[in-house]
Image: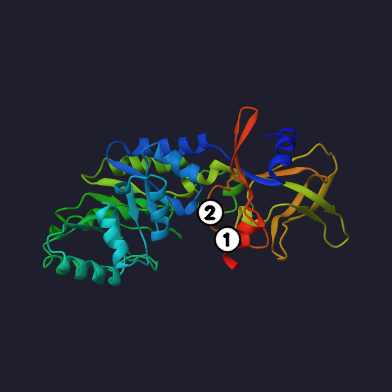
Amino acid sequence: MNKSQIENIAPKIGDSFFVYEKESLINAYNNLRSSLGNNGEVAFSIKSNYFSEVINDLKNQNSWFEVSSESEYEYVNSLGVEMNKVVVNAPVSTPQFFIKCLNNSSIFNIQNVRQWRDCKGIAAIAPNKEIQIGLRLNLGYNSRFGLSEESYNQILIELGELKNVAICSLHVHVCEGERSVKSFEEKFNKLIKLSENKSLANLQTLNIGGGFYSPMPDYLKDQFKDYIPDLEEYLSLLKKLSSKSEYKLIIEPGGLLVSNSMKFYTKVLSVDLLKMNSFIQVDGSIYDIQPTKSPKQLPYNVLSNSSAKIEAKVVGFTCMEDDVLIESFSEPCEEGDWIEFTNVGAYAQTLRPAFISSWKPIISIDENDFTLHRPKADNLNLFSQWL
């Protein structure tokens, strides 16, 4: 959008807002889905973005979904998602939630000994109930998630004594340091090797999780120490893996789908040019674009008619000293201008705290008009939990 378009919208919704770009989301999904052919599924990890339009738009594409808690599970259920297309990776669960997932034919990936104990207990009191489960495995990675090799082997031993329990899926999800094309192929090959066990006669799917890097401009790529694969490299790998196995391949992307589906616009409220430090105050916050406070600088564009370059920090509205959206700003800018941030579709809607001010509106642009999907939360909404 240009500055004129924004200035027509802002009086109706406020001085900071997100713009949802559905086309980007659908293109990303279709690229992934096509690469898997008929032997795979894309399960969107909803923890990366709770925006209902995102979930509904993916649901309309027949996407699967991945959730990490009972709350997320109930949320996608309320949006009409087919629950047999839901993968559950919940580190914390109750037997009641486990039973609910079984009854809905969701894939519940057991990932700790407590959940396996719950499974055995349910199998004992319901011997005529066919129980299909997934197993989330650690596979020796430096991660706190997933069953250890020792626990996995013990489960296979005990599985022989449980006539009504079968393993339908093997799963691994590791992110930190394991996002390369090679690492995903390595995870897949480890699952393939495990699938050869005779105790897994009911196995249907192999799940290599998520953690794929999202497409990003060179400006952002250059801030990473690791090599950032292009989307085509991931797509080529997924095509290769999905055609290599008799089992259906499931992936659980989050940021790869939604990072580029949203932009954030925030207004310059004041410019303070000081001897020691100069500041550009905006209506947004670092929490709106990078709630993790990552040191990486997100790509941005300044929408300005000014010709006077300013060197300053762009700072947010909170009282935190590190609420800095741009550390080293050097562009033409003046009060009343706007700054556009891209690559903000992942986690800015889920990790953003209710700190000092409310969540920002979300809109979409339709030709010369816009649709308001979520207004700015008023103070009553923001503080209702404390009343």
**Which color scheme does this rendered protein use?**
rainbow
Q: Nearer the viewer, residue 220 or 385?
A: 385
Marker disc for residue 189 = none
Return the x and y of residue 3 as percentages of the image width and height.
74, 36
Return the x and y of residue 183 as percentages of the image width and height.
38, 54
Q: From where the camera sits, is residue 110 visible? A: no
In the rendered image, the quadrant that contains the N terminus is: top right
Could you tell me which secondary element the residue under label 2 belongs to?
loop
Location of residue 319 by image quarter: bottom right
Proximity of marks 2 and 1: CB atoms separated by less than 8 Å? yes
In the rendered image, the quadrant that contains the C terminus is: bottom right
Decide which of tag 2 and tag 1 comes sooner along the chain. Answer: 1
Could you tell me which secondary element the residue under label 1 belongs to?
loop
Residue at (54% x, 42% y) in the render: 260
In this view, the residue farthest toward the top is 367
Cα–Cα gap, marks 2 and 1: 9 Å
347 relative position to 141: left or right = right
Return the x and y of residue 188 as percentages of the image width and height.
30, 52
In this view, the residue farthest toward the front is 387
Amino acid carrying mark 2 in the image: Tyr
Instruction: Categorize mark 1 by other alpha carbons within 10 Å: few (<14), some (14-19), many (20+).
Output: few
Q: From where the camera sits, is residue 106 visible? A: yes
Task: List the residue tagged with mark 1.
Answer: 292
Q: Nearer the viewer, residue 216 or 92?
A: 92
Task: List the residue tagged with mark 2.
Answer: 347
Residue at (25% x, 69% y) in the render: 118
